[in-house]
Image: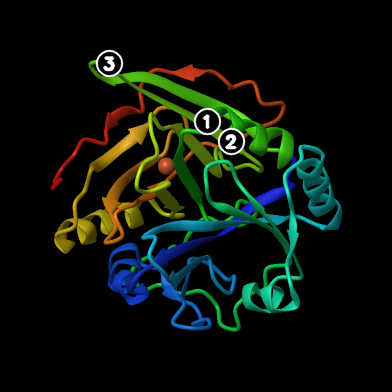
Amino acid sequence: MRHDLEISYLGIEMPEPTALSPFFAEVIGLMPGEPGAAGTLTWRNDAKSYRLIVQPGPASDAVFVGLEAAGTAAFDRAAHRLRDLDYELVEGTEADLAERRVTRLVKAQAPWGVRVELVAGLADALTPFSSGLVPGGFLTEGVGFGHAVFATTAFDESHRFLTEGLGFTQSDWIEMQIAEGIELEVRFYHCNARHHSIAVARAPFDLPQKLHHLMVETTERDDVEAAFDRARDSGLDIPMGLGLHDNDRMFSFYVQSPAGFLVEVGHGARTITEPWTGNRRYDRTSVWGHQPLRVG
Ligand SMILES: [Fe+2]
């Protein structure tokens, strides 16, 4: 399996970063990482020093996403391809490298309005990962922290940026009518064995949040069900209860974070094999379930 990139971290901006702490710690079961500069908090779901960064700011949204190259050659290939497509790359400073705990970093503005940080050498934490709430831990080895799904009006340009620029491959897509006259169109992209590390939904107009959801995958199915119980007990909205996705065959549910975007907790998704012959249209999101349980 080709393995050039992994989704290594997601940067979230919140007016008050601590507002997400009980959610990430007590509902999702993440482990705090070391705090960064100026009120920035970090969260871990494996041995890496952090996977989510929550920094102070007005957006209540994702503002950057880190993609870690599997080596120098993979880093250079992705950077060259982006430059060839006329995307402007800004070299990370020494301070950027220290803050992100990486050995290389270039920044580009993705068409969906979130900065992409192409990095290499994300450092491990000084302590092992351990979550009392998710005893089996999360599936991240060789596949990054999970996945992120963004909504954008720049749908086709985002496709080009991901495939021709970063070297992702489209896994498949969903095209379906979700209500009279309302189409849902989502394209799913892989860069390693995970079915998708990034997906992009076509937005009819600019939405207040670019991040629709982030996903973390547990290694044990029971840990999804326990997380579902915690989400239900939290009083937070559950726009999609337990269910099974059709395209990636993920058993999961979605809880709405206090920031507004959703977090999907899942298990058991199928993986990408090569040559990939599964790129086809799906006309439903789920085989069963994923029904709204408590919204608004
Ligand atoms: Fe998802």
On residue 181, the disc is: 3
Q: Nearer the viewer, residue 226 or 189?
A: 189
How far apart are labels 2 and 3 at the CA level?
A: 24 Å
> Is 182 rendered above or below residue 206?
above
Pick whichever of labels 1 and 3 is earlier in the sequence. 1
Q: Residues within 10 Å of mark 1 (few under 14, many from 20)?
A: many
Which residue: 58% across, 41% down? 111
Question: Looking at numbered disc 3 in the image, what kind of residue is underneath it?
Answer: Gly
Question: Looking at numbered disc 2 in the image, what kind of residue is underneath it?
Answer: Ser
> Is 280 rendered above or below residue 102?
above
Q: Secondary structure beneath disc 1?
A: helix
Quadrant where the N terminus is found in the figure: top right
List the residue tagged with mark 1: 155
- Is residue 187 among what the camera can see? yes
On residue 158, the disc is: 2
Q: Nearer the viewer, residue 190 or 115?
A: 115
